[in-house]
Image (cartoon, rainbow, N blue to C red):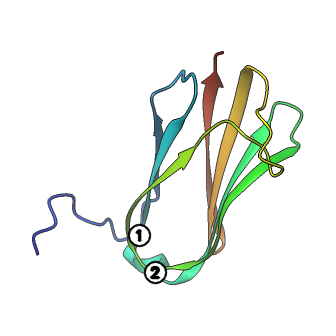
Amino acid sequence: NVNHSPIPTENIILQNFPNPFNSETIIHFTVPLELSNSLTELLIFNVNGELVRRLIKREIPSGNYLVRWNGTNEFNHSVSSGVYFYNLKIGNRQVTGKMNLLK
């Protein structure tokens, strides 16, 4: 089992593709070795800072992950076009990225 993308020991990597996106985007993130099995939350916020969607909330081991967001809120309703922020919290650390939803 060969892993072609090494797991960083400390840095959290976070990005999404495509950006801007129309119907869905893939959020890629890495849980570094030192934060393995920490509580991990991946949240989507609107420009007003309101929670739109919680994609992950659980303890996960170190590694590379892909999570799909289809532009819906917690009630599975489509959200409007605009700027959204994805926030990844792993243990006591967090990273935020920005994405654009175009319909």
Q: Which amino acid type is shown beneath numbered disc 2?
A: Ser
Residue 48, compared with residue 1, is above or below; it is above
- Horizontally, residue 103 falls left or right of residue 47, namely left
Q: CA distance from mark 1 to mark 2?
A: 6 Å
Residue at the spot x=52%, y=47% of the render? 68
Residues 92 and 55: in front is: 55
Seen at 51% across and 84% down, the residue is 37
- Tag 1: Cα neighbours inside 10 Å, few (<14), some, or many (≥20)? many
**What x and y, as percent, mark residue 72?**
73, 40
> In the orientation shown, which residue stands out farthest toward the left?
2
Circle on res. 36: 2
Residue at numbered disc 1: 32
- Quadrant where the C terminus is found in the figure: top right
Work out whether 77 lies above or below 33.
Answer: above
Q: Are marks 1 and 2 in contact (CB under 8 Å)?
A: yes
Q: Nearer the viewer, residue 67 or 41?
A: 67
Q: Position of residue 52 (x, y in %)?
A: 81, 45
Position of residue 25 in the picture relative to residue 42 (left or right): left
Mark 1: amino acid: Pro
Element type at marker 2?
loop
Residue 22 x, y percent position in the rendering? 57, 22
